Image (cartoon, rainbow, N blue to C red):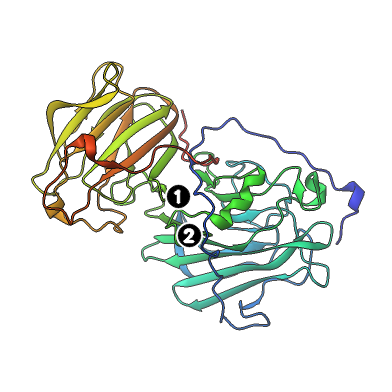
Amino acid sequence: MSRPYHKKPFSVAFLSAPLLAFALVAPSTVSAIPLIDGLGGPAGYGELAMLPNDDGSSNQLNLPFEVNFFGNTYNSFFINTNGNITFNAPVRSYTPSPFPISNQPMIAPYWADVDTRCSTCGSVYVAAPNEDTTVVTWNDVGYYYQDSSRTNNFQLVLRNQNAGNFDVEFRYDRLEWTTGDASGGSGGLGGTPAQAGYDAGDGTNYFALPGSFTAAVLNLQDTSNVSTSTPGLWSFAIREGALPGETPDNPLMPVITNEGFVFDFNVDLNETVFVDPLVAIGYDYIVNSGPNFASVVLPTGIGDNLYDLWLFNTALGAFVDSGVDITGGDIYNFGSGGVDRFRILGIETSALLDPTDPTAFVTGLTFTAAGQVNMNQNPISIDTGTSSVPEPGTLLLLGSGLLGLGAAKRARRQ
């Protein structure tokens, strides 16, 4: 049943939950990632998930594999017109609420007020091209009220990694609107913009992509946490029901930029968070805001398993060799009050670490207090074609600042 245009209310209850955030990648000159097609059906994206509707949902659909989503196993799901899938029941909400919101587990590539009723509004499709893949596509969808003056073209892919482990992939080919008219928008913009990410429905584990609830959510088509060469592609690993960052095998990944790697996340006191960008011969770790570093654990089995610790000398305005060697796998504590920055050197060039391996140099960090941490991990690189390694003062430092912030999650109960 359609709803009266003037009677559709909108309200959002913003929750004061701890958040994790990432830096946005600068707009890329590379075209946005294409959607997966060739899946059959009227548009090449599989079968219609539902007839043209507003705030509708599909019937309960079977997954070709089981997923372990934060301790709960599911083998079926619902597709909701408004840019998300849910596991326990359909969701008709058209104005997004910030994660975490309820006991309703949700994966949302673009939760906003989609309307597919007009003749040029596009449709929602579903396909299972093989026993290890499920694809849901919002193809050229318009917004409420029956408006296709701007359209969005995006996709959700679930990939089986066995034993309940799976990958979540968001693909944004084109994003032109953020908000339906009944969510305070006008012409597809303003009001309460879209939210992208996922929510375990347990009040604890959630993740919202950069730009959610702002006009910058449109930048998802130009950004990525995979590579600067794949704008519009966002990928997340769910392993043993847990988010990235909780184990060395599934570290928290940065959004990759040409300048370096930036992390911004919530921490609890004494909680270890594992982060991992591409590798180099060393890294600078810098807290831009939030509690200081309390300790660090560096990976084992790389070269001689020893790393050089450099600390920042404020008077000199430079890092200085502390004379301390840190052994991989050992916890090194920075002492009372911690430090807001440090440098690690000693990654041998002879180790030839693969710079595209997402688990090549996993670092464990703890912090001096709970709170929101905004930090950089900037790689130190050299030209390995030369015959000598330059002193640290002449090393090329890649990356230095945030390009933008987005809301996201890895909150814990206090």
In front here: 158 or 297?
297
In the image, 40 versus 22, the foreground residue is: 22
Residue 70: assigned label = 1
User: Is residue 392 shown above or below 340?
Assistant: below
Percent from the top left, x then y, of residue 414?
46, 27
Residue drawn at the location 47% of the way across and 36% of the way down: 411
Q: In which quarter of the view is residue 156 placed?
A: bottom right
Task: Give how far apart the Cα atoms at labels 1 and 2 are.
Answer: 13 Å
The residue lying at 55 percent from left, 56 percent from top is 222
**The disc labelled 2 sits on which kind of residue?**
Val
Left or right: residue 162 versus residue 347 is right
Residue 115 in which image quadrant: bottom right
Can you give x and y, in whole percent of width and height, for residue 267 in the image?
41, 32
Which residue is pictured at 19% across the width and 32% down the height? 331
Q: Which residue is mark 2?
A: 168
Instruction: Name above or below for residue 138 compared with residue 278.
Output: below
Question: Counting residues from the N terminus, which is met first, the one under dot 1 or under dot 2?
Answer: 1
Q: Position of residue 399 (x, y in %)?
A: 38, 42
Q: Is residue 7 visible?
A: yes
Q: Amino acid at mark 1?
A: Phe
Q: Secondary structure at mark 1?
A: loop
**Residue toward you, 206 or 334:** 334
